[in-house]
Amino acid sequence: MAGQSRQLCGLTLSFVGVLGVALTCGLPMWRETSFVGANIVTAQSVWDGLWLHCVVQATGQMQCHQGLSLTSDLQAGRALTLISVICAFLGFMVARCSVSRIQGGGLVALSGLLCLIAVSWSAGVTNFFSNDPLLIQALKRDVGSSVYIGLISSVLLLLSALLIGLVCWENDPPPPQPSEYSGFSDRTQRTVFPGFASPNRTSRYKYADISPESLYS
């Protein structure tokens, strides 16, 4: 019963993680505008994503266009998050089968690691440029919501892989341990004493006729 509950919990976390990584990949909020002192611009906000660059006006109007000039961390984030979504989906489908459960857990763990690398890399680069005193204020960005969603999703995927691995370890029967007296008991059961052979089997022991006189000759 405990194994089934762990498996159900692991599959649920894996499914939520798949949705989270998909949102991380699709939402254009990896970097957002940073507000600076008296020069706060309330008229618009700027979002940078893996696929789109969006400008949101104060009236609610949003204008997006495809991001062509991406930094190296966002270009790598595209590939890593796409591979992470594919691995997470395949891992969720494979983990549902009892035969290939361990392979599904491995795919889910790989998906969590890839997503964690992508969001950590992007957050590090964003914080580096945000604290750069030589960079003009208009080009500085803050870590966006997509990075935090990806971080939470990667943790959920790693926890899911851990639960699936525990279920596989509990269901795997331990190897038989050789008994210390197994060999002796087998030999004892197969021992046939002379004169007490089973009537259904032909005795292998043959006795020669020995007379008392031949013992002293």
Image (tube, rainbow, N blue to C red):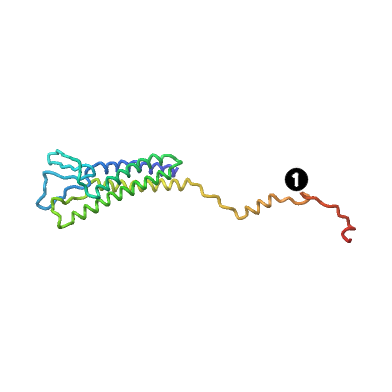
Q: Position of residue 192 (x, y in %)?
A: 73, 50
Q: Residue furthest left?
A: 38
Q: Position of residue 183 (x, y in %)?
A: 64, 53
Q: Residue furthest front?
A: 68
Q: Position of residue 81 (x, y in %)?
A: 29, 45
Residue at coordinates 53% horizontally, 50% vertically from top-left? 175
- The residue identified by callout 1 is 198
Q: Answer with left or right where residue 142 lies relative to residue 17.
A: left
Q: Answer with left or right where residue 188 lies relative to residue 45.
A: right
Q: Amino acid at mark 1?
A: Ser
- Foreground: 71 or 121? 71
Question: If the image is split into quadrants, where does the N terminus sit?
Answer: top left
Residue at coordinates 62% horizontally, 52% vertically from top-left? 182
Crowding at dot 1, Cα within 10 Å, few <14 / some 14-19 / many 20+, comes out as few
Q: Residue furthest right?
A: 213
| Residue 85 position by quadrant | top left
Q: Residue furthest top?
A: 61
Q: Position of residue 69 (x, y in %)?
A: 20, 46
Q: Answer with left or right where residue 125 lies relative to residue 91.
A: left
